[in-house]
Image (cartoon, helix red, strand yellow):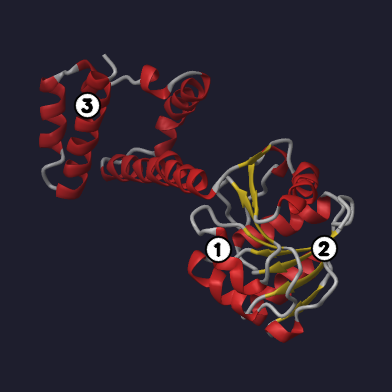
Amino acid sequence: MSSDQINSVVLLGAGNVATHLGKAFRNAGFRVLQVYSRSRKSASLLAASLGCTYTTRPEGIIDGAGLYVIAVTDDAIREVAAVFPHKGKFVVHTSGTTGMQDLNPAGDRLGVFYPLQTFSRDVEIDFSRVPLCLETARNADREPLALVASRLSDKYEWISGPQRRVLHISAVFACNFVNHMYAIAADLLESKGMGFDLLKPLIGETTRKACKGDPADMQTGPAIRGNRMIMDRHIDMLSDNTVYQKIYKDISDSIQKMHNDKK
């Protein structure tokens, strides 16, 4: 297979990741030929937005695409691979944690095409800024997949399975857990009649500093200063919510330990 042959894609999945990938493929000049999903509503909606056909039956998945992208939940990847009807085609999944071996039922031309970003269906993403983490089972498929990635994004890297799993858990800390801290902060503010907008300049500056240097070196607050009086006061203020109180204690302890370990 020559390196310039992948110009068409079939999406196996119709959720958030498939939706954003479908738009990115279309905008980069790929022909999105079809959407497959067990949900007729999801498949038809995404297919309509991409101007392609859809199917809800594995046997209805069309032959002839250059790349088949399985963009479903992690626990469904092997199931989709097992019913994929066209052995020998190039099949990739988009998971941050699932091993490439889960695609084995689909054949031997396998890979990973993991976009490192948080996706919400109705929030537009500049895909050119999304890092794409690539892996292939065969060396012969590296160049074709790299060329696909280079048309979608300005940044792609070859990431092994173990590296990708560490990257994914790091992303959970940096994105999902941080967002939960925002939700807790918003809840505390709202309980006293204040709005989350008050924190947005602080969040912006914290993010800017974290992106500029080593986040550990940018740490501020009572925990890293060892200000026990302030911390005890905060813990006492959270006495009516033991969950928030425990989170405060555990994160403060973690900040102090990391700071001490770096001395």
Q: What kind of residue is marked 2?
A: Gly
Write down the quadrant of residue 263 in the picture. top left
Could you tell me how many numbered marks the image carries?
A: 3
| Labels 3, 2: front one | 2
Q: What residue sits 65% from the left and 72% below the top?
A: 106
| Labels 2, 1: front one | 1
Q: Earlier in the sequence, mark 3 or mark 1?
A: 1
Residue 68 to residue 262: above or below: below
Q: What kind of residue is marked 1?
A: Gln
Q: Earlier in the sequence, mark 2 or mark 1?
A: 2
Query: In the image, 31: left or right of 81?
Result: right
Residue 251 to residue 103: above or below: above
Q: What residue sits 40% from the left and 31% below the top?
A: 199
- The residue at which mark 3 appears reads as 257
Quadrant in which the N terminus appears: bottom right
Q: What residue sits 60% from the left and 60% below the top?
A: 16
- Mark 2, secondary structure of its residue: loop
- Distance from the alpha carbon under mark 3 to that under mark 1: 38 Å
Q: Is 75 or 210 nearer to us in this picture? A: 75
| Labels 3, 1: front one | 1
Residue 148, percent from left and from top:
78, 49
- The residue at which mark 2 appears reads as 66
Query: In the image, 194: left or right of 238?
Result: right
Note whether residue 156 is visible: yes
- Distance from the alpha carbon under mark 2 to that under mark 1: 20 Å
- Mark 1, secondary structure of its residue: helix
Q: What kind of residue is marked 3?
A: Lys
- The residue at which mark 1 appears reads as 101
Query: In the image, 166: left or right of 159?
Result: left
